[in-house]
Amino acid sequence: MALIMFKQDIIDPFNKLSTWSSEHDCCAWEGVYCHNTTGRVISLDLYSFGTESKYLEGEINLSALFQLEFLSYIDLSYNFFTTLSVPSIHNNFTTRLQYLDLAGNDGLHIDHLNWLSQLSSLKYLNLSHIDIHKQTNWLHTMALLPSLSELHLSRCKLTNIYPSLKYVNFTSLVTLDLSQNNFSSKLPHWLFNLTSDISEIRLGGSNLHGEIPLSLLNLQTLEVLDLSKNSLSGSIPSSIGNLSSLIYFDISSNFLRGNVPESIGQLFKLNTLHIGNNGFSGVLSDMFFSKLSNLQSLDLSNSNFEFEMDTNWIPSFQLSEIDLSNTLQGPNFPSWLSTQMSLEYLDISNTRISSIEVDVWNFVAGIDNIYLSNNSISGDISNITLTSSIISLDHNNFTGRLPGLTANAGYVDVSHNSFSEGLPNGLENLEELIYINMESNKLTGELPLDMSNMTILEFIYLGNNEFSGNIPMKMPPSLKLLILRSNQFEGNIPSQLCGLTSLSILDLAHNKLSGPIPHCLHNITSMVSGETNSEAYFLENTFNLIMKGQELEFEYIGRSQTIDLSVNNLSGEIPSGLFSLVKVRSLNLSHNHLTGKILKTIGDLKNIESLDLSYNQFSGEIPQSISGLTFLESFNLSYNNFSGQIPQGPQLQTFDAWSYVGNPALCGVPLTKNCTQEENPSIPKQHSETDPFKESLYLGIGVGFAVGFWGVSGSLFLNKTLRYTYFRLLSRVADRIYVIVAVKFRNFRGT
């Protein structure tokens, strides 16, 4: 009965709870588990996570579940529940619940936690990703749970960590995760005075500042310490090596400085050491690592260490991942890395490496995640086949054909090199590929005509190469970004691109495309509706786009919807549906042969920031509706055949005349050409009445000038002697002026 009550408040879009009916024993229901002997319900597991997960929505009715007396385990994590119903604290209820996991229900808000006080048997509590910021006394509430050993409150929007509180009575606490909150505080005193045998503390990304206190050394049972991605300053306590139980130590991405204590080298149980992205300096030699035989993950990135490793050093450990990015390693590939046969993640980007030997390439090619970008590595690696899933070779000096790729390639960046010839054979069959960037090389040839097998490919960067032929009609159906600019593509823009409903960036500029703009672009629904700030979640780096006449950097696809078809041979009129793409932020159709009038529906592009229609053959008046585009920052209608008055509007007034030049029939501000009365009837002509006095004055001046002029000129004309005398006088005056000017000029040069 209690489970039926629980189900009544649930929205089940995938029919996950189809077995929950009276026709079946409840012990056979989806996610319900019973005791083998008693038949009592002891566990409810409706966890939902993964690409094919069947999530649930609606309300979590804990009041109903708490009626199950023997229920000890509840996992409802990573669904889309938005409401929580809990029993009143005044209602007496007993429960044997030991495990409660509601994590990952991002839309869920919990206003109070008083109901937790009656869960005296609770050992595990996970409310991560749930908003509990209204609970001002969360720490004391948790401390009242006598059996609590694991507490996970990551990403709960907490702001108070009670920094001045000295003691909290956690008697059983072993694991504490408060990461990804916004405490804006120093590390609290109570944290290092816990009486329980705490073994795991996670406070990464919680906006903590100040120094690491010496009282940290009180936690002798500590095995996991994560203080990464904060603003901690000062240095690492020199006696950190006394925490002999430490297995996981992450203080990366802070503002710590000085030398790394040698005592860290005594932590022989360490399997994870992340100290990168700080201000550390000093010498690191192979002796520092001599006792760290259990080390599996090492991060020394973004630091000023001097590495003094013996060229014949063979470490006692076998790493699975190492990050040496932005450190000084070159010019040769560090030889000791080749001894790490278990390596799955290697980042040596921006380390001034210029040379990798052939036998080392055979080693690197087998690493699952390789980052070699921003070095000066040269050579031909066309004979190498990379079996990696993540490949980052960008910004180097590679030449020759592209290396071979295997079926598990998911992220490939070989941009900004000098690779030549065509694409790797069988590229269109890489079904795991999500991201490919080959821009700014010397690649030639044609693209595969059918790329539809690449069903999860979302990002294609192939700009600034020498590709030719037609744009493939069959593109990956999940495509979000397509950049083919600055190549030699020709033919029409295929109308099949309109079927890419997730496309947010379409850049085909600087090619030889012809024909009309497809009339079906309005079918690209991601530019009409959808989540505005959808994050390119798998991209570790930002990406660049040409917008507003310059190259700009972006982090999110949802903030950069772009259509750029400029510098081609496109003709015809702009299809009306183009202006229904209301989420577009940049539209560039410049330098084509487009004709016709601009429809007033252009005013529907409410989010547009950059609009360039220059160097075409558009005609007619500029629609008044364009003055309502209040986000415009870059605007260009120059060199067309527009006519009439330029519309007036607060945003349009910020652009100068260069936005309108080359349209002879245009008039009005900011152009110097004024509109006539017919063009602007709202401006009346100026009329003035005749003044008789001024008329007489002007007539007298005219007559006087005529009499004087002909009095002198007539005398010179009729009297020959007077005429010669007059012109000789003018000649002498001119000669005298010339001599005076010449002398002054010579004196000036002499100084």
Image (cartoon, rainbow, N blue to C red):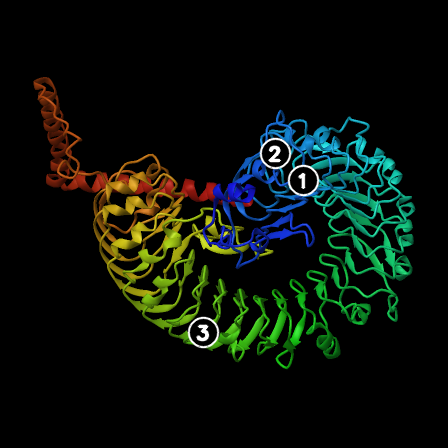
Q: Which one is earlier in the sequence, the residue at label 1 or at label 2?
A: 2
Q: Nearer the viewer, residue 708 or 131?
A: 131
Residue 747 at least partly seen: no
Task: Determine whether the residue tagged by mark 3 lies in a helix, strand or loop.
Answer: strand
According to the picture, the residue beneath numbered tag 2 turns out to be 132
Q: Residue at x 34, y 41 (%)?
A: 629
Q: Rounded to the nearest whole Å, what is the CA distance between mark 3 and mark 1?
A: 52 Å
Q: Cβ–Cβ below 8 Å for labels 2 and 3?
A: no
Task: Determine whether the residue tagged by mark 1 lies in a helix, strand or loop.
Answer: loop
Task: Determine whether the residue tagged by mark 2 lies in a helix, strand or loop.
Answer: loop
Residue type at the position of mark 2: Ile
Residue type at the position of mark 3: Phe
Locate residue 446, reporting x and y percent: 44, 77
Q: Furthest residue to the front? A: 38
- Tell me: residue 461, above or below residue 559: below
Q: Cβ–Cβ below 8 Å for labels 1 and 2?
A: yes
Hey, which quadrant is residue 577 in on the image?
bottom left
Locate residue 573, reporting x and y percent: 24, 58
- Mark 3, other Cα within 10 Å: few <14 / some 14–19 / many ≥20: many
- Mark 1, other Cα within 10 Å: few <14 / some 14–19 / many ≥20: many
Residue type at the position of mark 1: Leu
- Mark 2, other Cα within 10 Å: few <14 / some 14–19 / many ≥20: many
Q: Nearer the viewer, residue 714 or 333?
A: 333
Locate residue 593, reporting x and y percent: 27, 62
Q: Which one is earlier in the sequence, the residue at label 2 or at label 3?
A: 2
According to the picture, the residue beneath numbered tag 3 turns out to be 467
According to the picture, the residue beneath numbered tag 1 turns out to be 153
